Amino acid sequence: MISPLDELKNLQRAAKDQNLIIGSKTIRDSLLAKEIDSVFVSKTFHSQKTDLANLLSIAGIKINTTDMTNYELANHCKKTFPVSIVAVKSQKQ
């Protein structure tokens, strides 16, 4: 099992390598194309959470709920706009 700290390092590495997918609609499309390894959500993410969470759990994708706000998550993703949900692209493409 991967620790939350290792998952956060994975997120930061993916941000550096530009291997992130941001936004629930884009993540849903990428989920159908099987391009996702894991998903991170901010503590303030509420809209569409249950719908997307159900789709992700059916696909066997791990959802990492963080204690970060939208702005803190955006900072980890090297973005200047708030980020509520972000996925790490799969390396097996």
Image (spheres, rainbow, N blue to C red):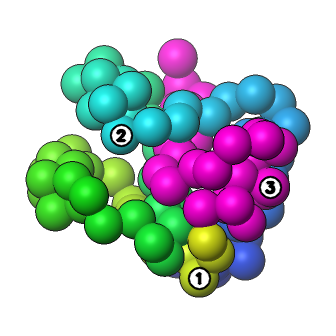
- Picture residue at 45% right of the left edge, 37% below the top: 23
| Residue holding disc 3 | 75
Q: What residue sits right under mark 2 in the picture?
A: 24
Identify the mark at residue 27; answer none if there is no mark: none
Q: Position of residue 54 (x, y in %)?
A: 14, 57
Look at 78% across and 56% down and name the residue there.
76
Disc number placed over residue 67 in the picture, else none: 1
Under circle 3, the secondary element is helix
Type of amino acid at the residue the image marks with label 1: Asp
Q: Which residues are magenta?
A: 70-93
Q: Is residue 93 above or below residue 21?
A: above
Seen from the viewer's position, the closer of residues 35 and 25 is 25
Label pair 2/3, CB-CB below 8 angstroms: no
Give residue 15's position: percent from left, percent from top: 77, 40
For this orientation, the residue located farthest to the front is 81
Q: Amino acid at mark 3?
A: Asn
Is 50 displayed left or right of 78 in the figure?
left
